[in-house]
Image (spheres, rainbow, N blue to C red):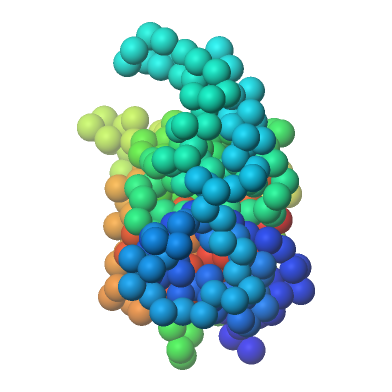
Amino acid sequence: MNFVEDLLNKAKAANKTIVLCEGEDKRVVEAASKIVKDGIAKIILIGSDEDIKASGSNADLSGVTIVDPAKDANADKYAELLFKAREGKINKKTGAPEYADVAAAKAAILKDHTMYGALILKAGDADGFVSGACHSTANTLRPGLQVIKTAPGFKTVSSCFIMVAPEGGNPYVPEGVAVFGDCAINIEPTAEELADIAVASADTAKKIAGIDPRVAMLSFSTKGSGNDAKFYDTVTKVQKATELAKAAAPDLALDGEFQFDAAVAPEVGELKAPGSKVAGHANTFIFPNINAGNIGYKICQRMGGWMAIGPICQGFAKPLNDLSRGCNVDDIVATVAVTALQA
């Protein structure tokens, strides 16, 4: 059984309800049909009949719960939740309260299906949330930050991708699965944020990817090799993040800073970082910023033939995940399965 099959079977056993916010997107509609038909999860699909018809999909949606916010009996309940979550918050552009009253909150959520989905999750009417096929990451995550908020003990919301090796595997990653973080949310994380990302990604590696995490803090430098004056701040940030992550999770196999080859190739790891338990054997890779992370996972995906599952969000109080706008139906199905396991 391959990784994705195992993931889907675990999701079936979890029997969770996931809300998909984009009934206007053909890929999402077809994924909803497939997920329910295959018993992977129960699905709440947000959209009007007109939205779904306009998507161009002819998928069988029997068994899918379709919620049109304009007709939903729960709209008042969700508007009340939003008003209470944002009460006292000021619109920076206008200087006025974001929502003057519950009626204003209701008017807003009837137009914003992503927020509506987040409120379904907040209310406990679903176990997880997936959006982003036709909305930006910012539009997808904003409702999460505003109403779901962070889990206890988490200061940083971040993301990672589970990268699944192509058929035939990869000699440097014998498990056939790796975790890359953060490739989608934090543009230029501080050392403290980078440490949070490392610990959260290791947790995802263990609980969702099913691997024993060996975490490499990545840089263009290995153990100070690139630590000249011009790039001092860049290298020392990763070095500091490594120290902080080790202090936060002392039992975690984590080391750095490493160049990618020193992290993944045993012969290079032994040469550049002798004595390290992670060098040359890493399977969880923490990039210094979003430039490196986003470029890295897309090279791996497009030129290496790896499947990228995610971005998987980390740090929210309830499971909330963002799709890539380039996703296909299988990507959505896999992300829903991950969300179900997070729940």
In the rendered image, the residue lying farthest to the top is 95
Q: Above or below — where is 296 with respect to 138?
A: below
Residue 123 appears in the rendering: yes
| Up/down of 115 relative to 62, above or below | above
Q: Is 4 left, or right, of 272 in this rendering?
A: right
Point 51% across, 80% down: residue? 60
User: Is 190 situated above or below 5?
Assistant: above
Judged left or right of residue 337, residue 160 is: left
Q: How far across and how far down the image is residue 116, in percent? A: 53, 43
Which residue sits at x=39%, y=60%? 51
- The quadrant of the rendering that contains the C terminus is bottom right
In the figure, 235 relative to 271: above or below?
Answer: above
274, 285: nearer the viewer? 285
Q: Quadrant of the N terminus?
A: bottom right
> x, y percentage for residue 101?
55, 18
Picture quadrant of residue 76: top right
Residue at the (64%, 31%) spot, across then down = 81
Question: What is the number of callouts on the image?
Answer: 0
Residue sitting nearer the eye, 109 or 124? 109
Q: Is residue 313 visible?
A: no
Q: Residue 332 location, x and y as percent?
A: 48, 68
